[in-house]
Amino acid sequence: MGELYNRLLDMNNLYNAFMNCKQGVDWKESVQRYEANVLHNISTLKQQLENKTYRQKVFFEFDISERGKKRHIKSMHISDRVLQRALCDYVLNPELFKYLIYDNGASVKGKGIEFSRKRLKVHLQRYFRKYSNKGYVLKIDFSKYFDNIPHDILMQKIAEKIKDEDVLSLTSYLISTFEGDKGVGIGSQLSQTAGIFYPTELDNYCKIVKGCKYYGRYMDDTYIIHPSKEYLKELYKEYKKIAEKLGIIINQKKTQIIRLDKGFIFLQMRYVLSDTGKVAVIPVNKSIVRERRKLKKLQKLKFKKLITKEQIQDQYKSWKGNLNKYNAYKSVQKMDALYNYLYGGIENDRRTEKVKRRRTRAHRKCYSGIYFAARCAYERHRRLENRKNLRSEIEGRAGSVQL
């Protein structure tokens, strides 16, 4: 067995994988049953890996609605999640992620959606210093990305970077559990790793071959910034050829070239590059409307005593804290007014109290400064009047002496 496969046979790695898997779901019965005999379970998993007799359990499939989109989820049993967690965290991710570009931020440790949003803002600022706000952005979106990844090409890409035959055999088996010859379904960590790594050829072509400095990708969403619209059109043709070779289908409706000064949407945020170089990051209206509707629905659940005010308050604080990072002052103020109307304000909000005290001190300083300035002006005016009166009195005395 190779060195990489031996990492899977390490009991410490398997136990750490279970501890990471149970975070946030330790209330589930299946997780509690597995944890009750965790040492025996991971020992059995290790023996199955050594004897090459491991077989994955059947997926638990269901549909969810996310922002109006229907997504089919293939959930796995906790024992299968432990194996995939160990395989991804200790074998695949360390070996594959070192070939990723820096601006690929989806589901990578230390990065994420916040990282990708900041990188786009940095790219816009750097672009402005060189070209001002005159230019274009090419937005590319993949259609049903996870459902269209071919198994054979994916394994070929992985085999180019990993030479351990046991690891490749296990990975190939896990990918084959998804029915058909393409698609890696949403719901497993292996699918996330595959989705991050698979379009690396496209990233390297844009970044290295074409030298696109202002390029970034978040899973199936891509942006390329350039001053020439014709250049982006030609680049898109070449990009599309490579995507077709990889079996990736590009969504023609969402793929477009937009002027930077007109603003564009990326990762549920609207970016506008002004004439002065300021980058305004504004949440899309859909997220505001969704939160407003959610607060009203939660009020009904509160009346039925299915949820407490503290839980609603925690949800709203989380949403508000995220929006405070962006240019959404008026939207937050309006949402605060709606929250206060529905629930009577936020209780025990230390940050809010600090802000109120800070504003009170600032107002006192402001008013004291205004009073001091007015007092000084009054004293100055009084001194000038006294001088005029004294001068006129002296002149009057001098005139009477001459007479």
Image (cartoon, rainbow, N blue to C red):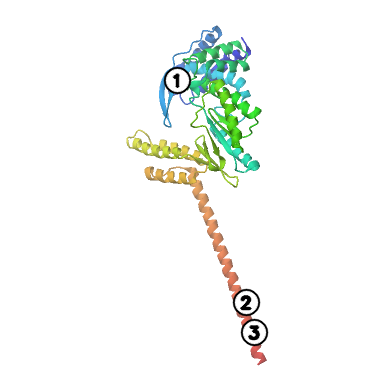
- Residue at the image position 64 percent from the left and 87 percent from the top: 397
Per the image, the residue denoted by label 1 is 74
Where does residue 80 sit, x and y in percent of width and height? 49, 16
First in sequence: mark 1 vs mark 3? 1
Q: In this view of the protein, can residue 296 be seen by the observer?
A: yes
**Where's residue 346, x and y in %?**
43, 43
Dot 1 crowding, Cα within 10 Å, few <14, some 14–19, many 20+ = some
Q: Give residue 387's mark.
A: 2
Q: Is residue 370 left or right of residue 400?
A: left
Residue that numbered label 3 is attached to: 395
Q: Secondary structure at mark 1?
A: strand
Please indicate whether residue 340 sits to the left or right of residue 273 in the image: left
* Residue sitting at x 54%, y 21%: 194
Mark 3 residue type: Glu
- Disc 3 is placed on an element classified as helix
Amino acid carrying mark 2 in the image: Arg
Dot 3 crowding, Cα within 10 Å, few <14, some 14–19, many 20+: few
Q: CA distance from mark 2 to mark 3?
A: 12 Å
* Residue 2 against residue 326 in the figure, above or below: above
